[in-house]
């Protein structure tokens, strides 16, 4: 079990073991959501977003070579700015 203290500004430091388990690094965002039974779940927002996008594309993401947040950003840059990956 890990414990974190909330600062006066509402900030917490995620324990190192939890950061490792979630694959978090500096600058990453974490997602908090409540399940129907009231349990609060914490997850790596980047990982969750990538999984959701890949599921929505049903194999298209893999065909396009989209496997990570960097791949998604490169695709967005290509559409926005005409930059090739």
Image (cartoon, rainbow, N blue to C red):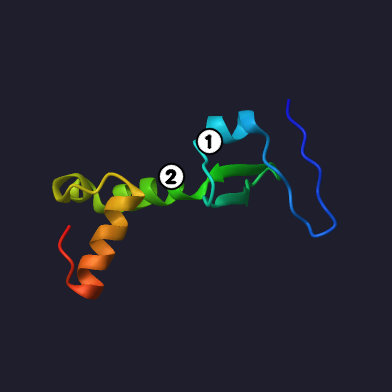
Q: Secondary structure at mark 1?
A: helix
Q: CA distance from mark 2 to mark 1?
A: 9 Å
**Between discs 2 and 1, the one toward the N terminus:** 1
Residue depicted at 32% across the width and 46% down the height: 68
Q: In the rendered image, which residue does mark 1 sit on?
A: 22
Farthest top residue? 1
Relative horizontal placement of residue 76, taking residue 22 as reference (left or right): left
Q: Residue at x 30, y 48 (%)?
A: 54
**Residue 57, numbered circle:** none
Q: Which residue appears farthest toward the front when viewing the image?
A: 26
Residue at 54%, 30% in the rendered image:
21
Q: In the rendered image, which quarter is residue 20 located in?
A: top right
Instruction: Locate the N terminus by quadrant.
Output: top right
Decide: is 17 above or below 58.
Answer: above
Q: Up-down: is 8 above or below 47?
A: below
Residue 38: x and y in percent read: 71, 45
Which residue is depicted at the point 22% across and 74% down? 81
Please name whichever residue, 84 or 55, is drawn nearer the observer in this view of the structure: 84
- How many other residues sit within 10 Å of disc 1, few (<14), some (14-19) or many (≥20)? some
Instruction: Give the SS element for disc 2.
Output: helix
Residues at marks 2 and 1 touching, judged by CB atoms closer than 8 Å: yes
For this view, does 65 lie left or right of residue 31? left
Position of 52 with respect to 9 (left or right) is left
- Residue 42 percent across, percent down from the top left: 61, 43
Q: Residues within 10 Å of mark 2 (few under 14, many from 20)?
A: some
Foreground residue, 29 or 37? 29
The residue to which callout 2 is attached is 47
x and y percentages locating residue 57 in the rendered image: 25, 53
């Amino acid at each position: 079990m890990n414990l974190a203290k909330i600062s006066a500004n509402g900030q917490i430091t995620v324990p190192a073991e939890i950061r490792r388990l979630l694959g978090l690094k500096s600058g990453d965002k974490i997602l908090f959501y409540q399940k129907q039974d009231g349990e609060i779940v914490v997850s790596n927002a980047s990982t969750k977003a990538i999984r959701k996008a890949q599921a929505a594309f049903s194999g298209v993401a893999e065909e396009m070579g989209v496997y990570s947040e960097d791949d998604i950003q490169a695709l967005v840059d290509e559409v926005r700015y005409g930059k090739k990956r």
